[in-house]
Amino acid sequence: MKNVDKGIKFDRVLLIDDNDIDNFINERMITTNSFSKVVIVKNSGESALQFLKDNSDNPDVLPQVIFLDLNMPVMDGFGFLEEYESLPESIRTTCKVIVLSSSISPEDINRASTNQYVVKYVNKPLNEKYLEAINF
């Protein structure tokens, strides 16, 4: 759902990354470029999945975009994507997953890019050019 009147592309974005500095930088990039009104930050795949489950019946809280880091402890981005597959269809159709990673491994890029729920693979850090190119 785009908010054309205010130039804001999306109402809500979920940022999943275990690195607080990356979260701070990416959140600032998202808000200063009017990409989203609200940025929800989760420091782990587990807490992000719980947030999505807790709000599965509340479309006004679900994010339209999920920026997902791959390299995280306990549950990495691929583990998140495996669990994401079992979430209700209402969540999977509302939320578009963009992998936001520092990994330049061809294996990681291919594995993420071929996942049915990943719409884009972006290298960290986010920048204005990347955000402008995101449209769905």
Image (spheres, rainbow, N blue to C red):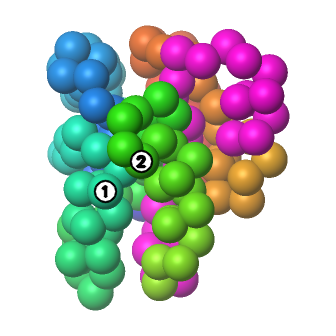
- Measuring from the top left, give residue 22's x and y in whole percent: 29, 17
- Measuring from the top left, give residue 33's x and y in whole percent: 32, 22
Which residue position holds label 1?
46
Q: Earlier in the sequence, mark 1 or mark 2?
A: 1
Query: Vertical placement of 66 versus 92: above or below?
Result: above
Asked if residue 106 lies in the magenta stretch, the reply is yes
Note whether residue 132 is visible: no
Which residue is located at x 37 percent, y 44 percent?
74
Q: Which residues lie in the magenta part?
A: 89-112
Query: Vertical placement of 19 versus 87: above or below?
Result: above
Circle 2 Cα neighbour tier, 10 Å, few/some/many (<14 / 14–19 / ≥20): some
Viewport quadrant of the N terminus? bottom left
| Left or right of residue 102, residue 41 in this image | left
- Measuring from the top left, give residue 136's x and y in whole percent: 60, 51
Q: Which label number is shown at residue 75?
A: 2
Note whether residue 19 is visible: yes
Which residue is located at x 30 percent, y 76 percent?
53
| Left or right of residue 19, residue 134 in this image | right
Query: Vertical placement of 78 versus 123: above or below?
Result: below
Nearer-the-camera pick, 5 or 31: 31
Which residue is located at x 50 percent, y 43 percent?
77
Which residue is located at x 27 percent, y 23 percent?
19
Asked if residue 86 lies in the magenta stretch, the reply is no
